[in-house]
Image (cartoon, rainbow, N blue to C red):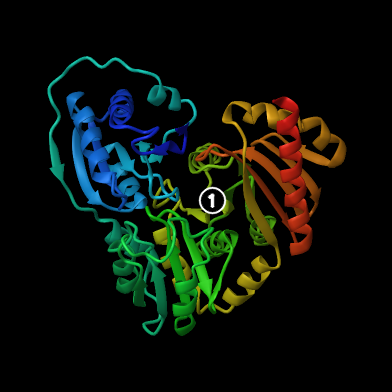
């Protein structure tokens, strides 16, 4: 089971059981000052069971629960701004047998100071039982106000991946003027996995040849991958396009996770913007945004564009509308080409989670000797040159160590990441 600011995640029935759900929901109750909590779940088979269990724990502690049903994560975040807190039953891009809980306070995910309240047992004094009711969301109408209208001839294909965006994304894109073709609308029979950043998206690539753009969402709608001219784009291209649109909207101050492409940072700086870097993870990016009063940003590895004005979370659905609205601009293809000139590779390697920190610490002296600049902001990052870097860090969502790299040469990028994996494996042998 993973317990991080990204939430609680585990394989349901194995290392995440209903008794765990009761415990985490009970603990979360102490953070809910408003005594109100919105809740929603994605399309995973275990979602309804977990949601009902969590609702019981919250109501037992006097929390009024407002059930949104099966909805994407960004919808719950949006409504949580009104009610004070939110709980999402999802493990986002993890395999179907996984599930989890994401916690929202004051419209944002919990931070590192609040995480201990979730994972350590909290005593709650018995109060009156909370109420529950089903509610609907104004998400589509709210997003439409930001997006405006697009060319009514714009054809887009969207790959739902059997996830919770099956009603929200097609409706929103249709309302702003797109002609939408949707595939994989149901989880059963979906031709791809839950994470579009790693799936080949074969069906969407084929369908998108007859459309201007293709969009693929993960199960809870916070990740988005763009397909253009029948070719899947990297997650960093998705983020770069969202950043380009936010620059058009007048944003100047940005936060990017440390694993985000250099190309995105250069795009911002060349347009007169400022960039701060944060640890990887939506909650970490948001935390840095709040500290620096940033207007937009995100994390490249998850294709996670964030626009705090609208939502304190990765916004795959809103980003699809923003990107659709700029597809006819004169610099759209230029931005895509610029982003494509950089190559990023992200892999993972299995390491006993008890030894994650020791494996990375064991590599620090080697990095300091080998690279002109290193960073311990999140794991261990080595700056190779102005266009190349390597990052080794422990995952927030799986029991693995992630190795990421970037360069303007794909071959060089492969060598950087292969070298990083070798270093991790050698360090693992040394510390065992």
Image coordinates for residue 90, horizontal then vertical, percent: 36, 45
Of residues 325 and 95, the one drawn nearer to the viewer in this rendering: 95
Residue that appears at 70% across and 63% down: 342
Q: Position of residue 416 (x, y in %)?
A: 77, 51
Q: Secondary structure at mark 1?
A: strand
Q: How far across and how far down the image is residue 18, in percent? A: 28, 31
Count of numbered circles on the image = 1
Whether residue 269 is visible here, answered yes or no, is no
Q: Quadrant of residue 148?
A: bottom left
**Point 23% across, 44% down: residue:** 48
Q: Is residue 168 left or right of residue 394?
A: left
Most distant residue in the right direction: 369
Quadrant housing the C terminus: top right
Quadrant in which the N terminus is drawn: top left
The x and y percentages for residue 354 are: 59, 26
Q: Nearer the viewer, residue 189 or 227?
A: 189
Disc 1 target residue: 298
Q: Report the residue at 57% width, 52% height from top.
A: 301
Q: Residues within 10 Å of mark 1 (few under 14, many from 20)?
A: many
Residue 98, compared with residue 18, is above or below; it is below
Q: Nearer the viewer, residue 38 or 57?
A: 57
- Position above or below: 207 against 283: below
């Amino acid at each position: 089971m993973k317990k991080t600011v990204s939430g609680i995640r585990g394989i349901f029935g194995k290392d995440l059981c209903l008794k765990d759900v009761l415990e985490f929901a009970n603990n979360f109750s102490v953070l809910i000052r408003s005594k109100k909590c919105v809740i929603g779940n994605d399309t995973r088979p275990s979602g309804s069971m977990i949601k009902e269990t969590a609702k019981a724990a919250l109501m037992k502690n006097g929390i009024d629960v407002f059930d949104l049903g099966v909805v994407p994560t960004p919808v719950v975040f949006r409504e949580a701004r009104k009610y004070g807190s939110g709980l999402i039953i999802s493990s986002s891009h993890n395999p179907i047998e996984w599930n989890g809980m994401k916690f929202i306070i004051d419209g944002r995910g919990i931070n590192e100071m609040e995480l201990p309240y979730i994972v350590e047992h909290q005593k709650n004094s018995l109060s009156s039982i909370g109420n529950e009711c089903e509610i609907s969301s104004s998400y589509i109408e709210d997003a439409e106000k930001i997006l405006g209208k697009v060319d009514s001839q714009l054809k887009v294909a969207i790959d739902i991946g059997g996830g919770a965006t099956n009603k929200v994304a097609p409706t929103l894109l249709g309302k702003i003027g797109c002609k939408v073709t949707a595939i994989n609308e149901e989880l059963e029979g979906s031709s791809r996995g839950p994470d579009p950043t790693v799936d080949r998206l074969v069906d969407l690539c084929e369908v998108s040849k007859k459309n201007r753009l293709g969009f693929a969402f993960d199960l809870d709608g916070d990740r988005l991958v763009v397909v253009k001219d029948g070719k899947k784009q990297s997650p960093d291209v998705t983020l770069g396009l969202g950043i380009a649109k936010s620059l058009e909207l007048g944003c100047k101050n940005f936060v990017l996770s440390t694993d985000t492409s250099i190309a995105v940072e250069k795009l911002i700086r060349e347009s007169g913007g400022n960039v701060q870097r944060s640890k990887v993870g939506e909650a970490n990016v948001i935390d840095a945004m709040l500290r620096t009063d940033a207007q937009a940003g995100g994390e490249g590895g998850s294709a996670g564009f964030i626009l705090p004005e609208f939502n304190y979370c990765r916004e795959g659905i809103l980003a699809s509308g923003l990107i659709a609205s700029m597809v006819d601009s004169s610099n759209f293809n230029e931005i895509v080409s610029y982003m494509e000139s950089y190559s990023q590779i992200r892999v993972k390697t299995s390491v006993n989670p008890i030894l994650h920190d020791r494996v990375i610490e064991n590599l620090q002296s080697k990095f300091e000797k080998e690279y002109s600049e290193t960073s311990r902001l999140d794991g261990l990052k080595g700056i190779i040159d102005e266009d190349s870097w390597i990052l080794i860090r422990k995952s927030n969502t799986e029991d693995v160590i992630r190795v990421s790299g970037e360069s303007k040469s794909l071959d060089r990028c492969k060598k950087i990441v292969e070298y990083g994996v070798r270093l991790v494996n050698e360090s693992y042998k040394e510390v065992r």
